[in-house]
Amino acid sequence: MFQQRHLFLVCAALAATLACGCGDDDGGTSNAPPTSGTVVVTPSPATLDITWTLRGPGGFSENGSGTRTFASQSLGNYTLTWGAVAGWVRPSPTTVTRKLEAGGQVDFTGLYRENLPSTIVIDATPDDPAMSWVLNGPDGYRHPGAGDLTLENLDSGVYTLTWEPRTGWWLPVASPQTQDVFGGTTTFTGLYRQDLPAPAGYRFVPDGVFTMGSPEGEWGRRDAEIQREVTLTRGIFAARSEVTREAFRTQLNWAYRQGHCIVDTLIVDDTPIYHVYDNLDGSSIELLNLSATSLGFNAAADSFVIPLSDQATYPIGGVNWYGAIAYCDWRSLRQGLPRAYDHATWTLIAGSQTATAGYRLPTEAEWEYLCRAGSATAFTSGPLLNPECGDPNLELVGWNCMPVVMRVEQKLPNAWGFYDMHGNLAEWCADLSAPYVPGAVTDPLNVDVGPLRIIRGGSYANPAHACRSARRDANYPAAGVANIGLRPVRTVIAG
């Protein structure tokens, strides 16, 4: 009986201690997380009678005006719609939804601007009625048209022009284009380029201007990804997909028989281990990690083979930076093109990528240009929604969070017809790894400093944030790693 009563008293004391929070560092105050937040609506200029409608969870609805603060609001999504004011242009977009987190604050700020009569000039090149477009503007404005046109006495606001496709021509690189139009004259320009026939497995991409790097708010962004405007002055032919095992094996066998590379055999525990070395310009550097490529060497046939024939269309990994360059040069030599690289110095023979006629590795800027294909989001298919695994936008176009590599061209291509730019295999670029030069640049290529070479795109083994268009990684050029491959390009040189 005593033991039972003693146990009862101990349990009661423990319950009382838990109930009062005794022993907590805050003196007994509750540590329960907040269950509400604050919503603030701030329109400007304050001199206007600006109305708005705010909707939220649990049936919350408020038709108000001017600046208002709503405290202790339920958590969830809030949607604000700005009201019309005669003679003024509403903020764009006119309806905004934001999520209120626990203990947080959501701010809806909206700037109204005076509606000034505006002129929009649409300048299409070539000036051809077949070059059609659609112009969308404030309050449902829509104007389809073609060729050059001037539209006068339009309301001010945000206008978006979308260039329409035309068979045999490349759309202007910036499409759609969005501009703020507030008085005066605003011009939308669109340069169509005629498509060029490309080598088998390659696609033509015209020269253009794009924004390289990522905005500060992008999930997973690194400091090295500063944004800058890049102008590329030459069109290129670029491989539609990563080089496959069969494509690499074919060129490797040809180069071996031509004496452009040699095979050395090392016997380890009675097992032959094969190494492939360069044999151009006096170079003898090792070009690949044969075991990581999933290729084999058949000594009896004196030939490289794919042990598993059903893996011919898998991309080739295990090729180091020197081997990637060697592949480009083998392809050039076999097609009667000038070789791009001097293997004694591993630099471009022509001195620059714009003057190089043979196959070569893309510059880092060219790679991102191809990957983005006119997009500005983390992936060519949309923004990053899950930084680890299972991102729905990445899953449309790339393989990641996988134990092994996958066949090429199994996911959707980007808008320019390129496959597997995100994930599957990371890809060697020409540049040495170094910080970007700030400001606008033309045809950038870093060959001056640093021991590491740039790789781009992320791989099958990486989380989603490492597969973004702007993500920069690097490795030693002699590293033959199973999850790094290549995608050659060729500069389009007239004549």
Image (cartoon, rainbow, N blue to C red):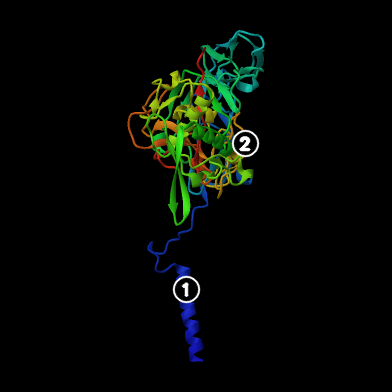
**Crowding at mark 2 (Cα within 10 Å: few <14, some 14-19, many 20+):** some
Question: Furthest residue to the bottom?
Answer: 1
Does the rendering let one see residue 65?
Answer: yes
Q: Residue at x 40, y 22 (%)?
A: 349
Question: Furthest residue to the left?
Answer: 449
Q: Which of these two is toward me, 145 or 345?
A: 345
Q: Which percent across, then down, holds residue 296?
A: 53, 45
Q: What amino acid type should be assigned to the residue bearing mark 2?
A: Glu
Q: Which of these two is toward me, 256 or 347?
A: 256
**Crowding at mark 1 (Cα within 10 Å: few <14, some 14-19, many 20+):** few
Residue at label 2? 409
Q: Residue at x 67, y 11 (%)?
A: 130
Does the rendering let one see residue 46?
Answer: no
Determine whether, in the image, residue 116 is placed left or right of residue 445. right
- Residue 16, disc: 1
Q: What amino acid type should be assigned to the residue bearing mark 1?
A: Ala
Q: Which percent across, then down, holds residue 52?
A: 58, 31
In the rendered image, the vertical position of residue 141 relative to residue 216, given as above or below: above
Q: Which of these two is toward me, 263 or 394?
A: 263
In the rendered image, the vertical position of residue 311 relative to residue 322, given as above or below: below
Q: Secondary structure at mark 1?
A: helix
Q: Residue at x 45, y 59 (%)?
A: 31
- Residue 211, disc: none
In the rendered image, the vertical position of residue 178 relative to residue 145, given as above or below: below
